[in-house]
Image (spheres, rainbow, N blue to C red):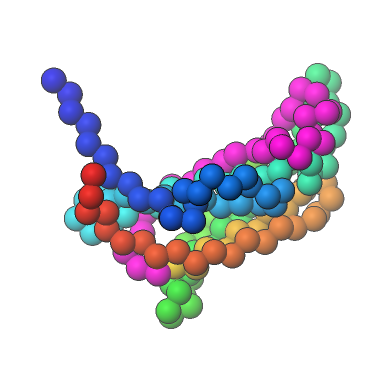
């Protein structure tokens, strides 16, 4: 017999049924890992119509560069920094212009409970256009199922 138990928390503001605006968005949730650490799970949504896509042989492609910085909110010290690139591909050009189409990516980061400031910079590799998102979060141990 296999029993799986999981605990997670979602920010109250993120539970609302509001439609995403056509900007870069970060949604977070977290859960306990062991006795002292938490896993911060970040969902990142990018509206495709903001990026430059180039025609390839049988699809359209865009390259996006990310920089994520997590700082302690009280002491303003950097605790985590990661940069990465991702390629976005779409079969049809129309899909790249539709404001309802989003590219979704995610990140898992292990942190201690506390108050943090997230900073995400997203850059279109072709146009060099930047989007910056700053968000404050408080991570507390999850004590409910």
37, 22: nearer the viewer: 22
Q: Residue furthest front?
A: 17
Where is 61 relative to 68, above or below?
A: above
- Horizontal side of 93 relative to 31 (left or right) equals right
Expressed as whole percent of the image width and height from the top left, the position of residue 89 reads: 72, 30
Where is 101 relative to 10, above or below?
A: above
- Horizontal side of 2 relative to 62 (left or right) equals left
Q: How many marks overall?
A: 0
- The residue positioned 84% from the left and 28% from the top of the image is 93
Where is 22 relative to 134, above or below?
A: above
- The residue positioned 85% from the left and 34% from the top of the image is 54
73, 66: nearer the viewer: 73
Expressed as whole percent of the image width and height from the top left, the position of residue 35 reads: 19, 55
Quarter holding residue 120: bottom right
The N terminus - image quarter: top left
Expressed as whole percent of the image width and height from the top left, the position of residue 25 reads: 61, 51
Residue range corresponding to the magenta coloring: 87-115
Q: Is residue 112 visible?
A: no
Quarter holding residue 36: bottom left
Where is 145 relative to 136, above or below?
A: above
- The residue positioned 36% from the left and 61% from the top of the image is 139
Q: Is residue 31 visible?
A: yes
Q: Residue furthest bottom?
A: 75
- The residue positioned 23% from the left and 44% from the top of the image is 145
Expressed as whole percent of the image width and height from the top left, the position of residue 70 reads: 49, 64
- Horizontal side of 115 relative to 120 (left or right) equals left
> Is residue 104 covered in magenta?
yes
Q: Residue furthest left?
A: 1
> Is residue 103 covered in magenta?
yes
């Amino acid at each position: 017999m296999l029993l799986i138990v999981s605990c997670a928390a979602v920010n109250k503001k993120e539970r609302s049924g509001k439609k995403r605006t056509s900007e870069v968005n970060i949604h977070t949730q977290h859960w306990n890992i062991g006795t002292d650490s938490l896993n911060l799970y970040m969902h990142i949504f990018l509206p495709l119509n903001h990026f430059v896509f180039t025609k390839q042989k049988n699809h359209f492609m865009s390259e996006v560069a990310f920089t994520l910085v997590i700082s302690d909110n009280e002491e303003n010290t950097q605790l985590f920094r990661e940069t990465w690139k991702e390629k976005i591909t779409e079969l049809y050009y129309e899909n790249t212009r539709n404001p309802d189409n989003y590219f979704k990516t995610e990140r898992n980061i292990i942190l201690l409970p506390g108050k943090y400031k997230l900073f995400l910079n997203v850059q279109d590799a072709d146009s060099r256009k930047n989007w910056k998102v700053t968000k404050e979060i408080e991570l507390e141990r999850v004590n409910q199922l």
